[in-house]
Image: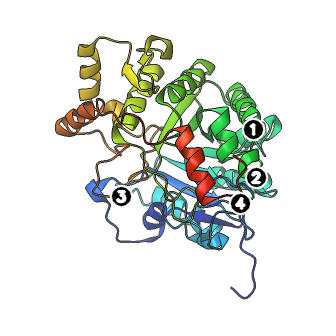
Amino acid sequence: MGGETRSSPEYVRVSMASELVLFQKLYRFHRNAVPQTINLLLYFEDGCKANCLYCGQAREASRRKPSDRTLIRVDWPIRKLDDVVEALKRLERNGCSYRPHRVCVATITHWKAVEAEIEIVKRIRRETSYSITALVTPTLFRESEFRELRNAGADRIGIAIDCATPELFDLLRGRKARGPHRWERYVEGIEEAIEIFGKGRVGVHIIVGLGEREEDAVKLIQWVHDLGGETHLFAFYPEEGSVMESWPRVPIGQYRRVQMARYLIDNEISRAEDMKFNEWGQIVDFGIPRYLLEEIALSGLPFVTSGCPGCNRPWANERPGEVPRNYPYIPSEEEALQCYRQLWLYTSPPINTYERLVEYLSKVMPSLST
């Protein structure tokens, strides 16, 4: 590049699936699960300044240079924003059978990120008609910046709190991880974002399987719902190069139960306080009659990707060909029945408790202050 500095807002990283949709003439997706959202990620040559221990972008954990670091286990090629915008316009102009529903612009933790994020949102809004989600960190974005994003053209905000408890957050993202993020600020940021963007327009990301109990995740989901937000679930899958690259994947039964709880809470069919949990915090009763639970499960809807309208994140939690944690399409009758049966698969005791996480981290990262 002749010494040219590549950084946002002039440049962005594009998820591999979005790269195929935007720039490749020929592509094929497993089960025809074409991504319905174009995912963009801010890029700065000195990388992310956070240190989240499960993330491939982490400041200390990754062995790769920032331009090669993965996110959700895939590469994110660097593209000029001009080229991305032109590709988006081409999809609109050609009247293709396929057209994504929205664009998601995700930040990283960097002192230039606020200005860059706002500028990218403005540019996409000015030149296209796509709905836009701004995925941000409250560590950098405060109430005034939320207003700027809304005025720039974002219709939704995403906030990845990821961890279900303050203790886990501090261990994996905060002081103990030598990271800049603080639980209290994330809670404030979620409240501010809902106040500014309105109810139903703020998505809070939770990663299931980081060491929380199912009960912890359910209580956080209920809090977000009562506040007026939505919960978007991710299943933990180890990221190569991260501190947690050898931490076990979340068991399918654990994830299915949290998926079901989220669906019931967000659709106001049940509440966290109506559910029952065993000694390990696992859900044993969803607070509704068994026949109704079975009927809801067999619809397949609780197991579809939870996200902004149109977001299906195909194969973000597993490899193509595996049973999806989040289905990027409505499951078939046979698939929905399998999901229902998976609700009753228990690992006793759980393999991914907070205590085991602390033990794991003390071995792989002895310098960590656990």
Q: Position of residue 186 (x, y in %)?
A: 71, 36
Which residue, given by chain and number where applicable, does mark 4 sit on? 48
State whether residue 166 appears in this view: yes
Which residue, given by chain and number where applicable, does mark 3 sit on? 319
Q: Which element type, helix, strand or loop, lies under badge 1?
A: helix
Residue at mark 1 to residue at mark 3: CA–CA distance = 35 Å
Query: What kind of residue is marked 3?
Result: Arg
Q: Are marks 1 and 2 in contact (CB under 8 Å)?
A: no
Image height check: is 214 above or below 178?
Answer: above
Query: What kind of residue is marked 1?
Result: Phe
Residue at mark 4 to residue at mark 1: CA–CA distance = 21 Å
Which residue, given by chain and number where applicable, does mark 2 sit on? 178
Q: Could you say which disc has been placed on residue 146 in the image?
A: 1
Q: Are marks 3 and 4 in contact (CB under 8 Å)?
A: no
Q: Which element type, helix, strand or loop, lies under badge 4?
A: loop
Q: Earlier in the sequence, mark 4 or mark 1?
A: 4
**Image mark count:** 4
Q: Earlier in the sequence, mark 2 or mark 4?
A: 4
Does residue 4 appear to the left or right of 228 in the view shown? right
Q: Which element type, helix, strand or loop, lies under badge 2?
A: loop
Residue at image position (55%, 51%) is 360
Image height check: is 158 above or below 57?
Answer: above
Query: What kind of residue is marked 4?
Result: Cys
